[in-house]
Structure formats: C-alpha cells, structure tokens
Image (spheres, rainbow, N blue to C red):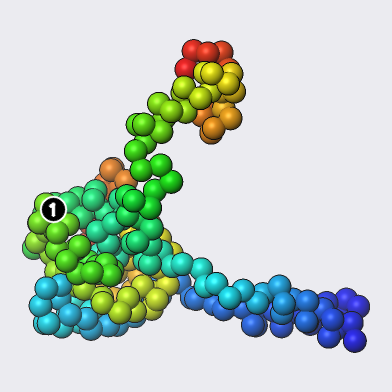
Amino acid sequence: MKLLLIVTALALLSACAVEPLQAWERGHLARPEMAWEPDSLRASQRDHVYFSKEASSGGASVGGGGCGCN
Amino acid sequence: MWRSACLALGLLVVMMPRSEALTVGDKAVDFSSPELGTDTPITLTDFRGQVVYLDFWASWCGPCRVSLPAMDVMYRELKDQGFTVLAVNLDADVADAQKFLLSRPVSYPLIYDAEQSLPKLYAVKGMPTAYILDRTGVVRDVHEGFRLGDESRIKHIIEALLAEEES
C-alpha cells in the first residue's frame, strides 16, 4: 500500500505535460521582439530615473550599494 | 519502508527520459544530410581519415557570430593537413541561415538539418556545440558555447589530433 502511494506520488510529480524546450528550438525566443526589454539603453535609463527617485538602488536588478554614485 | 522507497526511486530512474549525450571517447553517430542550399547529401563517413569539427549552429545564436568566422580562419589554415569543419545549421527557416551567411561567408561544408534530428541524435545541450572527431571518427572533445579566444584552445586540440597517425 505504501509502495503504491509512493509510486503514485512520484508518478504524479513527474507528470509534466510541457516538454522542455531544446537548445536548438529557441529561434523564436531569440528574436529581438521577444526580449523582456527590447531597447536596453532606454530600459537602463528608465531604471536609473526610477531608482534615483525612489532611492531604491538595486530594486530593479541594478547593481550598486545605494551611494548614489552609480 | 526503506525497501519500498528504494524500489520507487529505482522505478523513477527507469521511467525518466534519458538522452545520452555523446561524450569524449564515443564513436560519432553517422548521418547523411543535405548540404545547405542544395540537395547534395553530405555523409559523415566520407570524412573518415580527417579531423572533423562538427559544429551545430543557428543564425539566432549569438556566439555563432563569433565561432563561424573564427572556424573559417582555422579551416583555411589547416584544411591541407586533413582538417575539416562540418557546420550543421538548425534554423527553422533556411532563409535566415542564408542571410546570416551573406555577411559572414564561410568556405567549409554546411549542412541544413530541416527536421532538427541531428541535435537529438547527438543530444546537444547548448548552442553552439561542437564535437571534435579524430581521424577514426571518435569524439575527442566537446566544445560548448564559443567566446573570442576559444579558437586557440580548439586549434591546440586539432593540431594534436592532426599529428596522430590513423590506426
């Protein structure tokens, strides 16, 4: 009974419907329009304005210790 | 309790999908695929007796912009000593590859794998991945990724393999 329970639990845990994307299937994901931030320069400028105003350096994955010098 | 847990774990291991990546010491899996842009088949066994740099690449892969021109330089330098590059393109659309090659032309043989079956066969883990085969068709090195400067390491391996006698 215990064995059945363990096997069922493990089988359920491994029942993933989504196949992981293979390395060679990432062509569409690599397109520039698929990027989280299509314009990296504009994104970093916007980030800089944001953390300067909010005094939250590092909050938006920006490096720095909050000295205001970055 | 322990016995059943071990049994369940064993079952899980058996049930897990496995893709056996080709590693150093394995014989390279033979294939025959059309040349990029034509229908002429290119067969791996035709290159037996040569040191082969079997490269998997795609136009969207960033490091491939560095690796293709770098390997072309090496190919031109060492081809007379029995070295060749076989570059397998894995683009979904062959036009993307052709556009890429317009700005970075290469002189070595290019293969287009429309079904993307070869990377499955070799269990490629990242892009680009290259398998360096010796003159007998055995994998002697696997190079994953590509950075500027990697070519000196690769050249060192290839020159050592070129110096080996075919047994």
Asked if residue A64 can be seen in this view, the reply is no
Percent across and percent down for residue B138 are 33, 74
The quadrant holding residue B107 is bottom left
Tell me the quarter of the image containing the C terminus of chain B. bottom left
Q: Amino acid at mark 1?
A: Arg
Q: Residue at x 22, y 81 (%)?
A: B33
Q: Nearer the viewer, residue B61 or B147?
A: B61
Tell me the residue that label 1 is attached to. B104
Q: Is residue B3 left or right of residue A45?
A: right
Q: Secondary structure at mark 1?
A: loop
Tell me the quarter of the image containing the N terminus of chain B. bottom right
Q: Is residue B102 left or right of residue B114?
A: left
Q: Residue at x 38, y 62 (%)?
A: A26
Give the chain letter at badge 1.
Answer: B
Percent across and percent down for residue A38 are 36, 43
Q: Residue at x 27, y 54 (%)?
A: B64
Q: Is residue A45 above or below residue B154?
A: above
Q: Is residue A19 above or below residue B148?
A: below
The quadrant holding residue A8 is bottom right
Q: Nearer the viewer, residue B16 or B26?
A: B16
Asked if residue B102 can be seen in this view, the reply is yes
Percent across and percent down for residue B84 are 17, 66
The quadrant holding residue B9 is bottom right
**Disc 1 packing (10 Å; few <14; some 14–19; many ≥20):** few
